[in-house]
């Protein structure tokens, strides 16, 4: 029983880190879109942030963290309740997407291009990303061909794992810097709003996660995946 609880906690931890990576991407893509669409008039979080171009490194940090986060729980045998959890992921994704289209003023694409404190929009974004997380985490179980395709991508990353390892540290530092820039700006203005507090939280977790994976040499320890379909 105790071992089963540990397995489930580790799986939840893995999914939580994946979800946080996606939430970071959603938050920072909105800021990046605002920065470039307002160029050169908007200088976000000045004077602490030297350039909004650093947002691109934060996007890289979110992307780089997804794979090692998934690896934490990928080989755990948690069993299943009625269905594989990609079924639940697809259901959450479909339901949340419908609710966003029906009850909010933004499109699915626009959902990730806005930086807003609107509760409905942020809730919709969170549940859409939760569905994506569940779906992607279990994607290799959908079919052998998908698993082989993902393994080919993994093998490609294996060839440049040393560069990704270094990049993960650099992007972790950049993410921490953006977090501190937002925090200092909010303190300076005596205004820590809910939206920026949420953004700061996900950035802090992403930076800590990056450093954790660098310390564990997560990317250096990956192995090539099987790139052919087994006949057994």
Image (cartoon, rainbow, N blue to C red):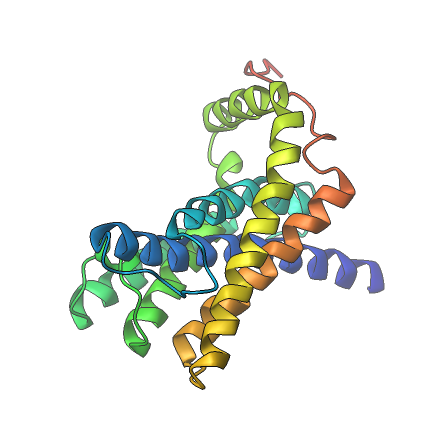
Q: Position of residue 188 (x, y in %)?
A: 47, 80
- Residue sitting at 53 percent across and 63 percent down? 179
Q: Position of residue 30 (x, y in %)?
A: 32, 57
Q: Nearer the viewer, residue 103 or 112?
A: 112
- Residue sitting at 69 percent across and 29 percent down? 222
Residue 81 appears in the figure: no
Specify the farthest residue to the bottom.
Answer: 190
What is the quadrant of the C terminus in the image?
top right
Specify the farthest residue to the front.
Answer: 47
Q: Nearer the viewer, residue 160 or 79?
A: 160
Q: Position of residue 53 (x, y in %)?
A: 39, 47
Q: Reply above or below: 40 against 191.
A: above
Q: Nearer the viewer, residue 28 or 7?
A: 28
- Position of residue 79 in the picture relative to residue 109 (left or right): right
Q: How many marks?
A: 0
What is the quadrant of the N terminus in the image?
bottom right
- Position of residue 186 in the picture relative to residue 116 (left or right): right
Q: Reply above or below: 73 against 16.
A: above
- Residue sitting at 29 percent across and 76 percent down? 118
Residue 23 appears in the figure: yes
Q: Reply above or below: 75 against 113.
A: above
- Residue sitting at 71 percent across and 42 percent down? 214
């Amino acid at each position: 029983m105790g071992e089963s609880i540990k397995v489930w906690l580790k799986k939840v931890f893995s999914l939580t880190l994946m979800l946080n990576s996606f939430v970071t991407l959603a938050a920072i893509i909105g800021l990046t879109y605002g920065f470039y669409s307002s160029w050169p008039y908007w200088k976000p979080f000045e004077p602490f942030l030297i350039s909004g171009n650093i947002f691109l490194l934060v996007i890289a940090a979110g992307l780089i963290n997804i794979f090692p986060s998934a690896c934490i729980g990928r080989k755990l045998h948690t069993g299943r309740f009625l269905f594989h959890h990609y079924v639940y992921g697809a259901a959450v994704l479909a339901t949340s997407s419908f609710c966003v289209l029906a009850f909010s003023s933004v499109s699915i694409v626009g959902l990730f291009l806005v930086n807003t404190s609107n509760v409905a929009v942020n809730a919709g974004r969170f549940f859409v990303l939760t569905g994506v997380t569940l779906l992607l985490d279990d994607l290799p179980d959908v079919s052998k061909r998908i698993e082989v395709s993902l393994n080919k991508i993994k093998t490609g990353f294996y060839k440049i794992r040393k560069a990704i390892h270094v990049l993960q540290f650099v992007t972790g530092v950049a993410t921490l810097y953006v977090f501190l820039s937002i925090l200092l700006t909010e303190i300076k203005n005596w205004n820590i709003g809910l939206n920026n507090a949420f953004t700061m939280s996900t950035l802090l977790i992403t930076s800590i996660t990056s450093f954790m994976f660098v310390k564990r040499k997560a990317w250096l320890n990956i192995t090539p995946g099987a790139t052919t379909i087994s006949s057994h």
